[in-house]
Structure formats: structure tokens, C-alpha cells
Amino acid sequence: MRHRVKRKKLGRPTEHRLLMLRNLVTDLMEHGKVVTTVARAKELRRLADKVINKAKQEDKVKAIREVLTIVTKKDVAYKLVNEIALKYADRDGGYTRLLHYDFRKGDAAPTAIVMLVEPRQESDEE
């Protein structure tokens, strides 16, 4: 039974799993997209949306400190707070997109691309 189970274990001990997800979030924010397995991608989406919500706070210093609890690189945290969060200021959620991609060569595991969604452009229709 899956009662009250919130996330997948991904076949790893807790510390390893959390660090793996933190590294995936850092790479996603640094490069804009990441290719990984579908199960990891679904967990990555949840964590990435939470990090972007933390980065959207009014107080920049507090936002950087909270983002650094998850993101592993300082320059990526600054980029997240000063650039990425500003792009999504008018958006309430759904910052990432998951696209099923291909099967991995070694073990035929299904892979997916997780990418940041481009913000909507306001059109000047008058």
C-alpha cells in the first residue's frame, strides 16, 4: 500500500537521493535543461518548482539563503534569484516541462528532458 507516501525512494539511501536531486536542480538552473530518467525527472520537477518559489521572495538576501539550502553552487543561486525568478514573477507555478525523450542505451531505461518553461511574451495588440 502507498498510503501517505509522498515521494519515491529511487533505489538510493536518503542522503544519496537528496544530494542527487540537489545536483539535478543545480544543473537544471545552470543549463536550462537536464536529461535524466523519467522517475528522477518527476521528482526533480517538484523540487525545482519549490526552489523557484523560494527565489521569488521580496527580500533578496533571504531568498539567496533559502535557495542555497538546496542549490549547491553560489553563482547558480544568484542567477536563480536575480534572473530566473524575475522571468517568472507573474507566474504562479508550472515552471518546468517534462518531455519523454528516448531509452537509455545501457539498460533501456526511459529517459526524459526536464526544461524550464519560457515565460509568456506580452503582445502589443491595440
Image (cartoon, rainbow, N blue to C red):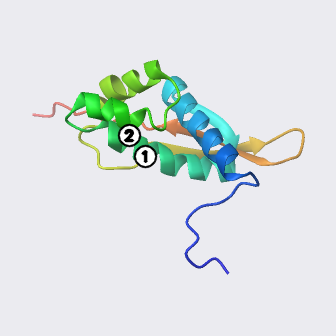
Classify residue 19 by image quadrant.
Answer: top right
Q: Is residue 24 left or right of residue 11?
A: left
64 and 53: which is toward the camera? 64
Q: Do labels 2 and 1 touch, CB within 8 Å? A: yes
Residue at the farthest left position: 126
Label 1: state its secondary structure.
helix
Quadrant containing the C terminus in the rendered view: top left
Q: What residue do we see at 55% from left, 66% from top?
A: 6
Total marks placed: 2
Q: Which mark is residue 52?
A: 2
Q: What residue do we see at 56% from left, 46% from top?
A: 44
Q: What residue do we see at 23% from left, 41% from top?
A: 90
Classify residue 62 by image quadrant.
Answer: top left
Q: Is residue 104 left or right of residue 24?
A: right
- Amino acid at circle 2: Ile
- Amino acid at circle 1: Asp
Check disc 1 and report the residue beneath it: 49
